Amino acid sequence: MQILSNTTANSKLEEFFISMLQEIYWSEQHLVTVLSTMTGAATNEELIQAFDQHRQQTEEHVKIVERVFETLGLPAQAEPSMGLQGLFDEGWQVIDETDEGSAQRDVALIIAAQKVEHYEIACYGSLVTLAGTLGEIEVADMLRAILTEEKETDATLTIIAESNINAKASEEPV
Protein backbone atom coordinates (compact mmCIF):
# COMPACT_ATOMS: atom_id res chain seq x y z
CA MET A 1 0.00 0.00 0.00
CA GLN A 2 1.29 3.45 -0.86
CA ILE A 3 0.42 6.27 1.50
CA LEU A 4 0.71 8.72 -1.33
CA SER A 5 -1.22 9.01 -4.53
CA ASN A 6 0.41 11.07 -7.27
CA THR A 7 3.05 12.27 -4.76
CA THR A 8 0.48 14.25 -2.78
CA ALA A 9 -0.06 13.34 0.85
CA ASN A 10 -3.60 12.33 1.76
CA SER A 11 -3.50 13.72 5.29
CA LYS A 12 -1.59 16.07 7.57
CA LEU A 13 -0.32 13.02 9.45
CA GLU A 14 1.14 11.58 6.24
CA GLU A 15 2.82 14.92 5.51
CA PHE A 16 4.31 14.96 8.99
CA PHE A 17 5.44 11.33 8.68
CA ILE A 18 7.16 12.06 5.36
CA SER A 19 8.83 15.15 6.79
CA MET A 20 10.16 13.13 9.75
CA LEU A 21 11.37 10.43 7.37
CA GLN A 22 13.22 13.00 5.26
CA GLU A 23 14.88 14.43 8.36
CA ILE A 24 15.99 11.05 9.69
CA TYR A 25 17.34 10.23 6.22
CA TRP A 26 19.44 13.42 6.29
CA SER A 27 20.54 12.61 9.83
CA GLU A 28 21.66 9.08 9.01
CA GLN A 29 23.61 10.30 5.98
CA HIS A 30 25.46 12.88 8.07
CA LEU A 31 25.94 10.57 11.04
CA VAL A 32 28.21 8.35 8.94
CA THR A 33 30.73 11.21 8.78
CA VAL A 34 30.24 12.18 12.42
CA LEU A 35 30.88 8.60 13.56
CA SER A 36 34.05 8.40 11.44
CA THR A 37 35.33 11.51 13.19
CA MET A 38 34.34 10.20 16.62
CA THR A 39 36.10 6.91 15.91
CA GLY A 40 39.27 8.82 15.10
CA ALA A 41 38.97 10.98 18.22
CA ALA A 42 38.36 8.13 20.67
CA THR A 43 41.13 6.45 22.65
CA ASN A 44 39.51 3.42 24.31
CA GLU A 45 39.62 0.39 22.00
CA GLU A 46 36.12 -0.80 22.92
CA LEU A 47 34.75 2.65 22.19
CA ILE A 48 36.57 2.84 18.87
CA GLN A 49 35.08 -0.53 17.90
CA ALA A 50 31.59 0.53 19.03
CA PHE A 51 31.74 3.75 17.00
CA ASP A 52 33.06 1.89 13.96
CA GLN A 53 30.37 -0.79 14.24
CA HIS A 54 27.67 1.84 14.56
CA ARG A 55 29.05 3.69 11.53
CA GLN A 56 28.67 0.48 9.55
CA GLN A 57 25.13 0.03 10.89
CA THR A 58 24.36 3.64 10.02
CA GLU A 59 25.46 3.06 6.43
CA GLU A 60 22.92 0.22 6.37
CA HIS A 61 20.29 2.45 8.01
CA VAL A 62 20.65 4.87 5.08
CA LYS A 63 19.88 2.00 2.70
CA ILE A 64 16.90 0.84 4.77
CA VAL A 65 15.43 4.35 4.85
CA GLU A 66 15.91 4.51 1.07
CA ARG A 67 13.94 1.24 0.81
CA VAL A 68 11.23 2.79 3.00
CA PHE A 69 10.91 5.68 0.55
CA GLU A 70 10.79 3.18 -2.31
CA THR A 71 8.10 1.13 -0.55
CA LEU A 72 6.07 4.31 -0.14
CA GLY A 73 6.50 5.19 -3.80
CA LEU A 74 8.51 8.30 -2.98
CA PRO A 75 11.92 9.55 -4.04
CA ALA A 76 14.50 9.38 -1.24
CA GLN A 77 14.81 13.00 -0.27
CA ALA A 78 16.81 14.36 2.66
CA GLU A 79 15.79 17.43 4.64
CA PRO A 80 18.06 18.94 7.30
CA SER A 81 17.19 18.19 10.91
CA MET A 82 17.90 21.20 13.08
CA GLY A 83 17.75 19.03 16.22
CA LEU A 84 20.36 16.57 15.10
CA GLN A 85 22.50 19.27 13.51
CA GLY A 86 22.72 20.84 16.96
CA LEU A 87 23.72 17.52 18.50
CA PHE A 88 26.31 16.94 15.76
CA ASP A 89 27.74 20.41 16.43
CA GLU A 90 27.93 19.57 20.11
CA GLY A 91 29.97 16.47 19.20
CA TRP A 92 32.47 18.59 17.25
CA GLN A 93 32.69 20.96 20.22
CA VAL A 94 33.43 18.07 22.60
CA ILE A 95 36.40 17.10 20.46
CA ASP A 96 37.67 20.68 20.36
CA GLU A 97 37.33 21.20 24.11
CA THR A 98 38.91 18.00 25.43
CA ASP A 99 42.47 16.76 25.47
CA GLU A 100 43.47 14.29 22.80
CA GLY A 101 44.05 10.81 24.22
CA SER A 102 42.23 11.51 27.48
CA ALA A 103 39.57 9.40 29.15
CA GLN A 104 37.67 12.66 29.62
CA ARG A 105 37.39 12.96 25.84
CA ASP A 106 36.11 9.39 25.64
CA VAL A 107 33.49 10.15 28.30
CA ALA A 108 32.46 13.31 26.46
CA LEU A 109 32.27 11.40 23.15
CA ILE A 110 30.06 8.75 24.73
CA ILE A 111 27.73 11.39 26.13
CA ALA A 112 27.58 13.22 22.79
CA ALA A 113 26.90 9.93 20.98
CA GLN A 114 24.20 8.94 23.46
CA LYS A 115 22.44 12.27 22.97
CA VAL A 116 22.28 11.48 19.26
CA GLU A 117 21.13 7.92 19.97
CA HIS A 118 18.35 9.13 22.27
CA TYR A 119 17.16 11.59 19.63
CA GLU A 120 17.21 8.84 17.01
CA ILE A 121 15.38 6.46 19.34
CA ALA A 122 12.65 9.07 19.82
CA CYS A 123 12.41 9.68 16.07
CA TYR A 124 12.38 6.04 15.04
CA GLY A 125 9.94 5.13 17.81
CA SER A 126 7.58 7.83 16.55
CA LEU A 127 8.06 6.80 12.91
CA VAL A 128 7.25 3.18 13.76
CA THR A 129 4.07 4.25 15.56
CA LEU A 130 3.00 6.60 12.76
CA ALA A 131 3.70 4.00 10.07
CA GLY A 132 1.46 1.58 11.97
CA THR A 133 -1.25 4.22 12.32
CA LEU A 134 -1.06 4.85 8.56
CA GLY A 135 -1.39 1.12 7.86
CA GLU A 136 2.19 0.82 6.60
CA ILE A 137 3.07 -2.38 8.46
CA GLU A 138 6.03 -3.30 6.22
CA VAL A 139 7.48 0.20 6.69
CA ALA A 140 6.91 -0.01 10.45
CA ASP A 141 8.81 -3.31 10.54
CA MET A 142 11.76 -1.89 8.57
CA LEU A 143 11.96 1.14 10.86
CA ARG A 144 11.56 -1.02 13.97
CA ALA A 145 14.70 -2.94 12.98
CA ILE A 146 16.65 0.33 12.97
CA LEU A 147 15.07 1.34 16.29
CA THR A 148 16.27 -1.92 17.85
CA GLU A 149 19.85 -1.30 16.69
CA GLU A 150 19.77 2.29 18.02
CA LYS A 151 18.69 1.00 21.44
CA GLU A 152 21.42 -1.65 21.38
CA THR A 153 24.04 0.97 20.54
CA ASP A 154 22.88 3.16 23.42
CA ALA A 155 23.13 0.20 25.82
CA THR A 156 26.60 -0.70 24.51
CA LEU A 157 27.83 2.85 25.07
CA THR A 158 26.54 2.77 28.65
CA ILE A 159 28.33 -0.52 29.32
CA ILE A 160 31.59 0.84 27.89
CA ALA A 161 31.34 4.02 29.96
CA GLU A 162 30.57 2.16 33.16
CA SER A 163 33.18 -0.56 32.62
CA ASN A 164 36.16 1.72 33.15
CA ILE A 165 36.18 4.95 31.16
CA ASN A 166 34.18 7.01 33.67
CA ALA A 167 36.39 5.87 36.58
CA LYS A 168 39.56 6.47 34.59
CA ALA A 169 38.41 9.99 33.67
CA SER A 170 37.65 10.76 37.31
CA GLU A 171 41.32 10.11 38.13
CA GLU A 172 42.74 12.39 35.44
CA PRO A 173 44.22 15.60 36.86
CA VAL A 174 42.78 18.97 35.99
Image: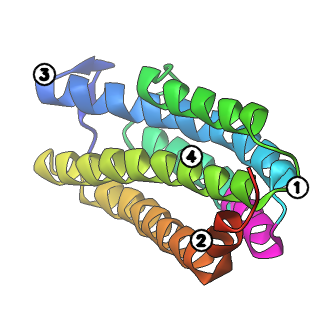
Q: Indicate the amino acid at tag 3.
A: Lys
Residue 26 appears in the rendering:
yes
Q: Indicate the amino acid at tag 4.
A: Ala
Tag 1, which secondary structure?
loop
User: For the residue carrying disc 3, how many other residues have a C-alpha within 10 Å: few (<14), some (14-19), or many (20+)?
Assistant: few
User: Distance from label 2 to label 3 (Cα)?
Assistant: 42 Å
Q: Which residue is mark 3?
A: 12
Q: Which residues are magenta?
A: 44-56
User: For the residue carrying disc 2, how many other residues have a C-alpha within 10 Å: few (<14), some (14-19), or many (20+)?
Assistant: many
111 to the left or right of 13: right
Q: Indicate the amino acid at tag 1.
A: Gly
Tag 2, which secondary structure?
helix
Q: Residue at x 35, y 50 (%)?
A: 124
Earlier in the chain: of badge 1 and badge 2, it is 1
Q: Which residue is mark 4?
A: 112
35 within the magenta span: no
Q: Which residue is mark 2?
A: 161
Q: Residue at x 46, y 37 (%)?
A: 24
Give the camera-side residue of 22 and 160. Answer: 160
Q: Which residue is mark 1?
A: 101
Q: Residue 16: percent from the left, percent from the top?
A: 23, 26
